[in-house]
Amino acid sequence: MPKRVEGVPWVSVGMRWQLVRRRRGAGPCAGALRAAALRRVDPVFRVATVNVNGIRAAQRRGFEAWSAGRRCDVVALQEVRCPVPMLPPGVFGDYHLTYDAGTLAGRNGVAVLTREAPGAVRTWGAPVLRRSPGQEHETLEAIEPGRLARELKPFVAQGRYVEVDLADRPVTIASLYLPKGGLPAELQKPGRMREAPDGGARFERKMRFMAGFARHITAARRAALAQGREFLLLGDLNIAHTPQDVSNWRRNVRSEGFLPQEREWFGELVGPRRLVDVVRSLHPEADGPYSWWSWLGDSFVNDTGWRIDYHLATPRLARTAVAAVTDREESPAARLADHAPVVVDYDLA
């Protein structure tokens, strides 16, 4: 156990101990020490978001053990990448599952795991799977989408967004997987890109998605507040907002995910009267904490990563956050995926 700092709690993070900042007092996070076990600091409403990069692969790497140890109240998943009939039996433990698999084979898929069956479910029109613990049925439910921004209509069947009203708390939870995108045409240089040049098509596609999504999430947030519910957007946004959110940021100013247009859009999404970046509010001066590292080279060992997985909360809910950590594993071999879970404790007492 590390040396105690008066007024600041140590919370276990996977196989590490992470110093975290309370809602009032202390300062930003400062250091870490590996430890052997998880413990929960009660009373909290614990919420996690994680891009599993394929639930079947994540299961083989220890997703069930992580989930059982973390004991979250809500877990949002992205890139589940699994047709409903092929979901591993028992992988979600004693959670209720709400899952939009999409129709793109081996891609996307978003889910929300909850302790109680959701009071309501909303999608963009795609059918969803709703299962209680122990069930294995494959029946999909049609969900009326309501009004949808025209820019989002081409994405309806891609498994990118699902939203639930919690039955046990006045909170609406959304899980989002935002398109990765690409470079604008003027930045594309054949022979110096991982992917073939596309004339900026992937970049324009992402920008259209973001334009429609900004209006959609504003409407969703306002609808939740009108019903007396807080709103929490969780997910992989594929954007690093500030230089603190990406290693070697000067080298990445012309990289997808850190382009000026993407960062400007993110800046308009958040604000003291809109949505609050909860992790950044608790770690205002820290680099990271990063949530994605390439599988290539020593990126993980050297902590050369990106912070692209977020908790974006309505201001009142954000003010209840008391701890925010990234469950970064102790070694590359122990990784669940190329992303690490981002876990926040909210004190709703």
Image (tube, grey):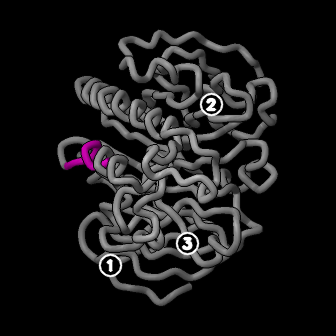
Front of the two marks 3 and 1: 3
Look at 59% across and 26% down and name the residue there. Answer: 158
Q: Reading the chain from its start, which is encountered first: label 2 or label 1?
A: 1
Q: Is the magenta region chiefly helix, strand or loop?
A: helix
Residue that label 1 marks: 7
Residue stretch in magenta? 266-271
The Cα–Cα distance between marks 3 and 1, rounded to whole angstroms, is: 31 Å
Badge 2 density bin: few <14, some 14–19, many ≥20, Cα 10 Å? many
Badge 3 density bin: few <14, some 14–19, many ≥20, Cα 10 Å? some
Residue situated furthest bottom in the rendering: 3
Look at 61% across and 12% down and name the residue there. Answer: 141
Residue that label 3 marks: 304
Question: Is 248 rendered above or below residue 189?
Answer: below
Residue that label 2 marks: 97
Look at 33% across and 64% down and name the residue there. Answer: 282
- In the image shown, does 294 or 51 lie closer to the viewer? 294
Badge 1 density bin: few <14, some 14–19, many ≥20, Cα 10 Å? few
The quadrant of the picture occupied by the N terminus is: bottom right
Q: Quadrant of residue 329?
A: bottom right
